[in-house]
Image (cartoon, helix red, strand yellow):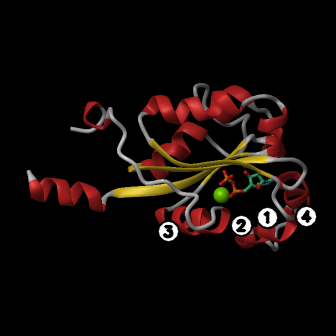
Amino acid sequence: FLPHLVASMEQVEQTYIMVKPDGVQRGLVGEIISRFEKKGFKLTGLKLFQCPKDLAEEHYKDLTSRPFFPKLITYITSGPVVCMAWEGVGVVASARKLIGSTDPLQAEPGTIRGDLAVQTGRNVVHGSDSPENGKREIALWFKEGEVCHWTPALALWISE
Ligand code: UDP
Ligand code: MG
């Protein structure tokens, strides 16, 4: 089984998921964490955090030239966020599916945004859009030692 194990380890990805200030204010933290927990992904980092402006700008640096950028920075820094790192095979794309489309009115029912939000500017949650950005964002939001590598007792009941 060793080659199989090595191959599957290469597919393990990390994604940065964040409950935005509206999600925290609306009491949706537990609900949002639950969706990723129930799916079977592994939580490796978790904290409540007041994001400073420079970090918000760095996180969203690809959107600097967009007209909504100043409002986006105000939104993300307007109250505490919940920062999470999640790990698993295919976790980046799967988390994006669980989250749903950027515009909550276009997001399918059953997704977080589809079920819990109505506006793009208040879409309650962030998820990395690629494995590279997953790593980049986790390194940006978490300090050394804050990400925890562990083996869930139920791992073999989730992945064969
Ligand atoms: N956003 C916005 N207006 C827009 C597009 C995006 O306020 O027209 C905000 C929204 O909060 C979104 C974030 O900017 O989640 C990042 O945009 P992106 O296109 O990366 O969407 P996401 O990856 O979050 O679905
Ligand atoms: Mg994005």
- Mark 1: few, some, or many residues within 10 Å (few <14, many ≥20)? some
In three-dimensional space, the C-alpha distance between marks 4 and 2, rounded to whole angstroms, equals 13 Å
Q: Are discs 3 and 4 less than 8 Å apart at CB? A: no
Residue lying at the far left in this picture: please name it.
1
Q: Are discs 1 and 2 less than 8 Å apart at CB? A: yes
- Nearer-the-camera pick, 7 or 71: 7
User: What residue appears at the point 77 percent right and 47 percent down from the top-left corner?
Assistant: 81
Residue type at numbered disc 2 = His
Of the numbered discs 4 and 2, the one sitting upstream in the chain is 2
Where is mark 4, residue-wise? 70
Q: Are discs 4 and 1 less than 8 Å apart at CB? A: no
Q: Nearer the viewer, mark 4 or mark 2?
A: 2
Of the numbered discs 4 and 1, the one sitting upstream in the chain is 1
Mark 1, ligand 1, within 8 Å: the answer is: no
- Mark 4: few, some, or many residues within 10 Å (few <14, many ≥20)? few
Q: Left or right: 102 with respect to 14? A: right
Q: Which mark is residue 56?
A: 1
In three-dimensional space, the C-alpha distance between marks 2 and 3, rounded to whole angstroms, equals 13 Å
- Mark 3: few, some, or many residues within 10 Å (few <14, many ≥20)? few
